[in-house]
């Protein structure tokens, strides 16, 4: 809703502004989504998150395997505790072993749930931190370029309103800074980083 109100106020201001002021207003555009996806650090961040998720999945799988094994042991203990071929004392002993195993299962189940929740929270925090850092870098560069070229404002062509419609309905694209921003951001990319991005872009096109 805030985006819609801002868009309405901006449109009203442009319509009501005197012709001279309108002529002096300099506006540039940037496709923030394309810049974000095309930045080599985005690919690096995604790889780090994927590796972290893979490590968490391995630990989680090991914990689930332990849980399943403990359940199998418990079922065997319960069966043996009901074996009428052994003495009552032995059956009672096996029953206590089964009860101890059940407590162990409950602790494993609790640990599995806690680990899963913590792993998901850690990944979400990690992803948000990396995304925020990358967006800040992009915005800082956009601000620098906007000021150096004396633009009054730079608008994001990938932004959408509260109604999921494009925020900017029309632009000639003459003052679009997207390609320049991407070029500057990737100027310090390590060897192979850009080829990995290009491969990802081609894969998206094929889909």
Image: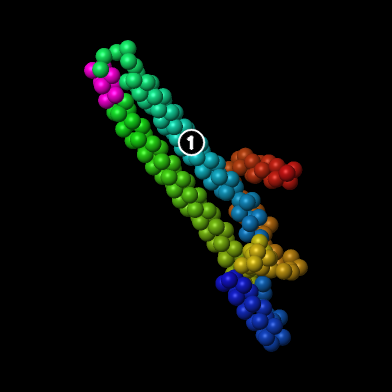
Residue shown at 32%/12% (left/top)?
85
Return the residue at label 1.
57
Q: In this rendering, would 85 be left or right of 63?
A: left
Q: Which residues are magenta?
A: 89-97
Residue 66 can be seen, yes or no: no
Q: In this rendering, would 47 be left or right of 114?
A: right
- Image: 45 above or below 147: above
Image quadrant occupied by the N terminus? bottom right
Residue shown at 41%/41% (left/top)?
113
Image quadrant occupied by the C terminus? top right
Q: Nearer the viewer, residue 203 or 207?
A: 207
Considering every residue shown, the one lying at the far top of the view is: 85
* Residue 93 in magenta stretch: yes
* Residue 158 in magenta stretch: no
Which SS does the magenta portion mostly show? helix
Assign a secondary structure to mark 1: helix
Residue shown at 25%/17% (left/top)?
88
The image position of residue 76, as x and y in percent, is 38, 21
Residue shown at 65%/44% (left/top)?
197
**Quarter occupied by residue 30:** bottom right
Residue 175 can be seen, yes or no: yes
Considering every residue shown, the one lying at the far front of the view is: 84
The image position of residue 83, as x and y in percent, is 34, 16
- Image: 7 above or below 34: below
């Amino acid at each position: 809703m805030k985006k819609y109100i801002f868009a309405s106020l901006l449109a009203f201001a442009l319509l009501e502004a005197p012709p001279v002021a309108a002529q002096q207003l300099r506006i540039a555009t940037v496709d923030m989504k394309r810049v974000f996806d095309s930045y080599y650090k985005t690919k690096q961040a995604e790889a780090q998150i994927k590796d972290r998720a893979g490590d968490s999945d391995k630990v989680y799988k090991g914990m689930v395997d332990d849980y399943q094994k403990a359940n199998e042991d418990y079922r065997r203990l319960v069966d043996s505790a009901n074996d009428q071929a052994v003495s009552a004392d032995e059956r009672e002993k096996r029953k206590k072993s089964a009860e101890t195993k059940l407590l162990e299962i409950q602790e494993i189940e609790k640990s599995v749930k806690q680990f899963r929740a913590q792993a998901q929270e850690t990944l979400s925090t990690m992803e948000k931190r990396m995304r925020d850092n990358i967006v800040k870098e992009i915005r800082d560069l956009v601000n620098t370029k906007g000021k150096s070229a004396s633009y009054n404002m730079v608008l994001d062509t990938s932004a959408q309103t509260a109604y999921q419609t494009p925020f900017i309905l029309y632009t000639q694209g003459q003052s679009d800074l997207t390609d320049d921003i991407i070029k500057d951001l990737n100027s310090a990319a390590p060897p192979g980083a850009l080829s990995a991005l290009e491969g990802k872009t081609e894969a998206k096109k094929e889909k």
